[in-house]
Image (spheres, coloured by chain):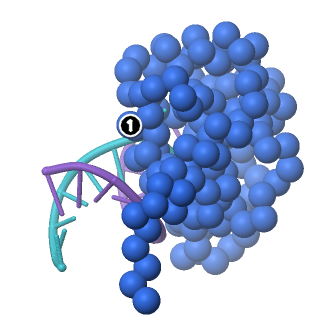
Chain colours: A blue, B cyan, C purple
Amino acid sequence: MANRPPQPERRFAARVLAAVRRIPAGRVSTYGDIATLAGAPGAARAVGTVLRSCGDGATPCHRVVAAGGALGGWTGPLEFKRVRLRGEGISVDLARVQEFGRHRWPPSHLPAARPGKAGRQAGRQRSPTLARKG
DNA sequence: TTTTTGACTCTGA
DNA sequence: ATCAGAGCCAAAA
């Protein structure tokens, strides 16, 4: 049958926002992880699309950062995102979250964080090249 | 409906 | 460390 998700719970955007609200204060998550939690692994970019309109206080969209601990984007001045994160006790570098692995949420690795990019074509295993310095 | 855009991510140079 | 290229996904035009 034609699966049309007119219901907010069914909407991708709603699931993304719900996942973001689950991020505890003082923790951060990535677009990719949120996508997986929302049931759409590999849709990191789409998560950004949703968060782009997240200019409200209902969802802690500032806790969503890019992979590797990069700050990611922000609708307004990126400085606001830093300030918010710092306000929760997270040390933020000019361009990265310090001790990203420590503040990351969820703490456990996700079931299927599909590499889903250039890696797939190469077909090779990807190296843990998450360069970060604490 | 098709095409374009964009708070992404990874690999390779 | 930094830049460019390629792939993926969903929403907006």
Q: Is residue A23 above or below residue A35?
A: above
Q: Secondary structure at mark 1?
A: loop
Residue A124 rendering spot, x and y as whole percentages = 68, 73
Identify the amino acid type marked 1: Ser
Residue lying at the far bottom of the rendered structure: A1
Q: Quadrant of the C terminus of chain A?
A: top right
Q: Is residue A44 above or below residue A65?
A: below
User: Would you name the residue on which mark 1 appears?
Assistant: A53
Is A52 displayed left or right of A126 in the figure? left
| Residue found at x 40% / y 17% | A77
Q: How many marks?
A: 1
> Residue drawn 61% across and 57% down?
A38
Q: Could one spot residue A52 in this view of the protein? A: yes
Looking at the rendered image, the quarter that the N terminus of chain A falls into is bottom left
Q: Position of residue A90 (x, y in %)?
A: 73, 18
Q: Out of A3 and A42, give the one closest to the viewer.
A: A3
A107 up-or-down from A7: above or below: above
Is A129 situated above or below A1? above
Name the one closer to the observer, A20 or A102: A20
Rendered residue at 51%/50% (across/down): A14
> Which residue of the protein is positioned furthest toward the front in this rendering?
A7
Point out residue C4 in the picture as x, y percentages from the top left corner. 36, 49
Q: Quadrant of residue A58?
A: top right
Given residues A21 and A43, the one toward you in this image is A21
Q: Write the residue at 44% across / 34% down.
A: A54
Q: Chain of mark 1?
A: A
**Which image quadrant for residue A113?**
bottom right
Q: Residues within 10 Å of mark 1 (few under 14, many from 20)?
A: few
- Residue A119 is situated, as x and y percent measured from the top left of the image, at 59, 68
Report if residue A69 is visible in the image: no
